[in-house]
Amino acid sequence: MSRADELAKTDAERVCLAALREATGAGDDPMERHCVRQFLIAERMASDRGLEVNRELLLCATFLHDAGLYDSVTTGDVYVADSRRLAERTLAPFDWPPERLALCLDAIEQHHAQRSRWKWGAEVELVRRSDLVELSRGLVNFGVSRAGSTSSSARFPASGLYRLIARSRLHRGWAASGEPRAHLHAAEQAPRDTSGGAAT
């Protein structure tokens, strides 16, 4: 059993994990491990700040935030929008309250936003920040120790992730699309507030 399987405790979480695996055509692959590392970092950030967040929402969002990279999911739109649409379809049977569903979908679509998204909801900003911390391997930290962020990488190796993302972007031709390039240049594109202090 993979770490993602261990984390997925509710029906919604398991269905989102299954949707990710259907998109990637694999299980416990580089993308799945990226999602696991990102979720664990987001959980730690929430704990460090004393934030009460919806665990199920956060895990569903991290599982599906990059699913739009894959040919089986894309519509030709920017991939964060395709990821949002997949999550909306996947979660529809669970009849989440509209506000909760919107929070999850916003967390997915806004995870490359260049400015803080605290005002959108804690989960939205935590998904954004944890993605930057994870992909930059702790160079961008928002108050999370680099040792803490790299420990997740040691337990769930990132081998193959950056090659996968680069191949997907080249295949889709997104480098010239104007879409934020945080996947390939997380450290350079990150906000300068890395202290974990009050958000703006």
Image: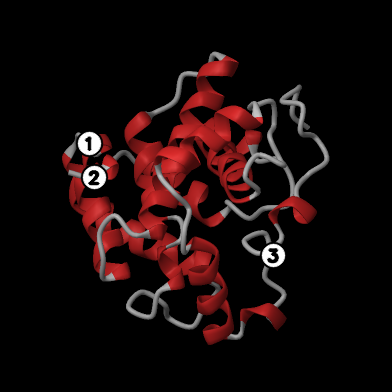
Asked whether the viewer can see residue 76, the reply is yes
Q: Indicate which label's residue lies in the foreground, 2 or 1.
A: 2
Residue drawn at x 65%, y 26% is 145
Q: Position of residue 168 (x, y in %)?
A: 50, 77
Left or right? Give the position of 164 relative to 15.
right
Q: Secondary structure at mark 1?
A: helix
Q: Amino acid at mark 2?
A: Ser
Residue drawn at x 24%, y 39% is 8
Left or right? Give the position of 68 relative to 120.
left
Q: Is residue 36 above or below residue 83?
A: above
Q: Indicate which label's residue lies in the foreground, 3 or 1.
A: 1
Where residue 100 sits, quadrant-wise, is top left
Of the two numbered discs 3 and 1 on the same chain, state the one appearing first in sequence. Answer: 1
Of residue 104 and residue 183, the one placed in the foreground of this image is 183
Cβ–Cβ under 8 Å for marks 2 and 1:
yes
Left or right? Give the position of 112 relative to 54.
right
Q: Which residue is mark 1?
A: 6
Q: Position of residue 104 (x, y in %)?
A: 42, 45
Q: Secondary structure at mark 3?
A: loop
Residue drawn at x 47%, y 36% is 152
